[in-house]
Image (spheres, grey):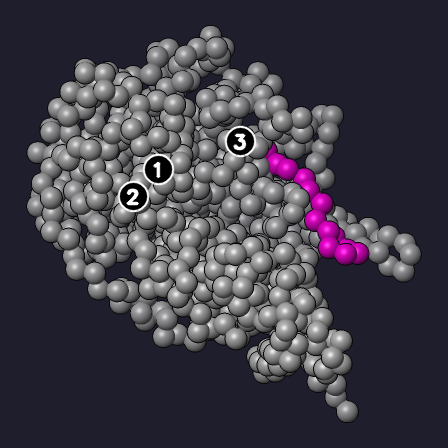
Amino acid sequence: MKFEPLKLNKNEFQSFLKELAKDHDLFAPVRLAEGVSVYRRIDSTDEIDLDAFNPQKPLKELFFPQSEAMLRFEKVENRHRVTSADQIKKPRVVLGARACDIQAVSILDDVFLGKEYTDVYFLKKRQSTTLIAFACNSPLSTCFCASTGGGPFDRKGSDLFFIDLGESYLVEPLTDKGKALTQSTLFVKASQHDIAFASELEKKAVQKTDASLPMEGIEKKLDQLMESRFWDRVHEKCIGCGVCTFLCPTCHCFDIVDEAVNEQGQRVRNWDTCLSSLYSLETSGHNPRPSGRERTRQRVMHKFNYFPKNFKKIACVGCGRCIIYCPVNFDIRQVIQDAQKGEVSKNP
Amino acid sequence: MVQKKLREKAKELLSKKEVDLIIGFGEGSQPLRATPVFVRTPEEADRLVWNSFCENNLATYLHKFNRFKVGIVVKGCDARSVTALALEKRFKPEQIVLIGIPCQRMIDRKKLKKAVKGEIVKVREEGDKIIVSAEDGEVVLRRDDFLYPLCKACTHRNPVQETLLVGDRVEEAALTGPNPEAREFEKKSPEERWAFFEKETDRCIRCYACREACPMCYCTECFVDSSNPKWIEKSLSPSDLQFYHIVRAYHQTGRCTNCGACERACPMDIRLTYLTQKLNQEVEELFQFETGVDPGALPPLSTYKADDPQEFIK
Amino acid sequence: MEPTWEPKILAFLCNWCSYAGADLAGTSRIQYSPNIRVIRVPCSGRINPLFILKALQNGIDGVLVSGCHPGDCHYLTGNYIGRRKSATLKRFLEYLGVEEGRVQFSWVSAAEGGKFSQVVDEVTRDIKKLGPPKHFAKQMRVQGV
């Protein structure tokens, strides 16, 4: 670690945020209803829902929004005026991000910030954002980040790392960007005791997370299963909604549409889901993925076979949202285990 | 025990080849969940379970299997959905074997989660109690406090139509008209009611879990995907979110069985049933119709009576 | 002097009765509120509730749906079905919080030019009292995060 760990008392947290808010736009989990939260820009520090373990809508929303106006157009007299999307006016700070979501954003970097093509919308947001991560002291039974190259205390990708010690936070600046936010006198040097306690918490959390999912060789195994009848049974219960894809921090499919009424409109990019029957429907009427079987197979293959082929990493961070929120309890962990065995287990 | 009898019945049907497969519930991968299973051999029948987390309406799968002879596990509400679908000619009635289970009413797992500190690792039902193991140890809760609101108000817990009945019939609650919550809601001003509607739909993410979980939503082209005419856009604009929910609910007029699958599927916990409930109430009051009770009764919006109410028409 | 707000009202009129009735009002030179825009449909039963919603979403201040009297439908039973749809839709919209009177229904026959003008005047008066709708109309900007 380049920088010394610091400590911030919980009763100073609001003051810290107010200081940050002077020069930054703050983004944090905001509660929309009991048990439902999303990442949003906050105007007041009271809006933050720190009880939200992991908001339903993942961190990708802040870099790749569900609906984003790319440009706007209108007819003015006899000419067309095109204006670019909303500019980012202030540097942004995100609070309360979890390691899994941050790892996911790094995966999205591969998609949106490629060598041949750079998505300017994603880039601008990424460049102007400092990520403050919160460690997960109590991972859920559905958290399998440890099986996907991450962990509840994984610091990769975050600028500032907060660990909840009970009455205070241990704060680890990990990058210059992160360090720059800790200039306030509210931060004090962390004691050896604080550091040791944080270490204990980390050990406990890591023990709780599921590292047992057999990911080794999954890419090759799925290659062998491409034409298998395996998928006939796997896809059955999937009802083809978009919950898993929209709540997934790494899913990144989108659809671009022009919305126009009379003489004005906008070009909008919206999230799309490969599980929709319309996703691959062609104008001719032909659909290369005509049933849930092909679509479910596609989703699993994309995450654990196609993406690794292109980018050398699996497109899953083990956040568990797809397992928690799926209306029919489709469990990707079960699919991976079955795929490794080559057959759907009769008694899961 | 219902579960034992269910498995026996399933084994019987499958070994006699009276059905090609049975759609039922199996053990979920997490506590508080059951998951749909598709059982094709008598051995697999041991995967079938029955508990208070069997909350999905399995009739939604009948569209996928309409070329087969299917046995399907149904609660009271689900059975009525199957009748409604048969009326809409989605399959031939003789293709379906209804394995009806008089419903003990389902537990609201989201409400249960919120009532306990930390993650629930185990749950056990004992009569009218639920025993939950979580962070602070075991908590004993009253089952009645955690039923889904629609289940509490249910008047068709026994499957009205069924080919086979597993378990004993339960006593039905008397029909009492609109539930107290709906009555309170109707007393509010239009402003307040719209504010509630707006607040609920604002968090919609157009995942269509509600639509896919609903057995009655089976249009090959849903109105949201229509581009000519284009009714609504795909983006998250509040007006379009409101439009979507108004119309999806309205398309259930005379077809919805109050099974609650839509609300249970929603990842953002939107109170969807408060919409469909009202439409079911209306259809009852105006046309004395209840979905799926009389297999011969035509859907209310495709028929009429000469003396239908019209006091609102100038 | 401040101009009073004039609502824009969409009137769906069935071709055989209400539209003809409106025609009659015109040829009889009956004066009535100029606030309606007419859309001619074959039958009041053809009305898709989405038409009414789309109208409200696009900034229309009020909707009138008018058809043949029960028993007189050119297609025999169209207006009966329309009556059921209208009843359920009206109640549902009011339950949601759309003000009572923003969406209205009437039976006007081809001979009732007088009634048509009365209905339009009444509906216009009602909508004027309600004022412009404060909700549901679509804004063209996609909200940022």
Q: Residue at horizontal 55%, vertical 45%?
A: B223
Question: Which secondary structure dominates the residues rendered in magenta?
Answer: strand
- Residue position marked by numbered label 2 in the rendering: B295
Q: Residue at horizontal 19%, vertical 48%?
A: B157
Q: Return the x and y of residue C124 as percentages of the image width and height.
A: 63, 79
Could you say whether the residue bearing mark 2 is in a helix, strand or loop? loop
Chain of the residue under label 3 = A
Q: Are marks 1 and 2 in contact (CB under 8 Å)?
A: yes
Residue A264: say if magenta: yes
Q: Return the x and y of residue B279 as percentages of the image width and height.
A: 39, 58
- Residue position marked by numbered label 1 in the rendering: B86
CA neighbours of label 2 inside 10 A, class few (<14), some (14 to 19), many (20+): some
Res A184 label: none
Mark 3: amino acid: Ser
Q: Is residue B308 left or right of residue B5?
A: right
Q: Return the x and y of residue B176 as percentages of the image width and height.
A: 22, 64
Front-most of residues A247 and A29: A247
Looking at this rendering, what residue extends furthest in the bottom direction? Answer: C1
- Residue position marked by numbered label 3 in the rendering: A277
Q: Nearer the viewer, mark 1 or mark 3?
A: 1
Front-most of residues A242 and A288: A288
Q: Which residues are magenta?
A: A252-265
CA neighbours of label 1 inside 10 A, class few (<14), some (14 to 19), many (20+): some
